[in-house]
Amino acid sequence: MGWYSYSMRRFFASLVLVAASLGLAVAPVAADPPSARIVLSFDFSDNSAPPAVSNGVFHIATDVLPEGTRGVVRMIAIAPGDAGVSNLVCRFQNVVKSRVECGFNFTAAGTWLIRAQYATDLSSPIVLTSGTSIRVGD
């Protein structure tokens, strides 16, 4: 009886350890909100140098990863504090082929902050925001 009792205790201890390990491996994945798996990445016409443009229209794309993610993205260009111009807003657009693109007409020189905001649909709150800076020259 002693050997059987010892073996069963080891078996149950091993079973609990395996179950706990599986629980730790599975629980964080299930507990993550959907936005934790989504990445917003900016794409400019020339990725070989830091983004810089002259005053005028410049197109900025936001890639929504992983591919096939559905939702809507809005982009906002926040003007430099001393520029004396308003922020630029590109309305919410559906993600198409993992991408949303906006054309901004920059009217002031300086560093503009570009924010992309992601929501699962137009009636849902924004669940993810990403930002980058772009230098606008004269």
Image (cartoon, helix red, strand yellow):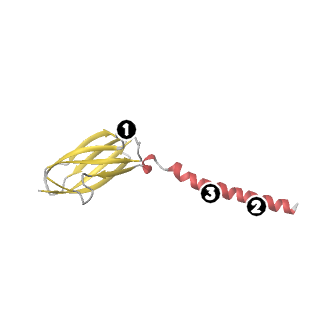
Relative side of 20 to 118, left or right = right
Question: Which is more N-terminal, label 3 or label 1?
Answer: 3
Q: Residue at x 26, y 52 (%)?
A: 44
| Residue kind at label 1, given as amino acid type | Asp
Question: Which is more N-terminal, label 2 or label 1?
Answer: 2
Residue 126 position (above or below residue 4):
above
- Residue 21 placed where, x, y %? 62, 57
SS class, disc 1: loop
- Residue 26 placed where, x, y %? 57, 52
- Residue 67 placed where, x, y %? 40, 45
Q: Residue at x 71, y 56 (%)?
A: 15
Which residue matches tag 3? Answer: 21
Instruction: Tell me where residue 100 sits by quadrant.
Output: top left
Question: Which is more N-terminal, label 3 or label 2?
Answer: 2
Which residue matches tag 2? Answer: 10
Neighbours of disc 3 within 10 Å: few (<14), some (14-19), many (20+): few
Instruction: Tell me where residue 50 sits by quadrant.
Output: bottom left
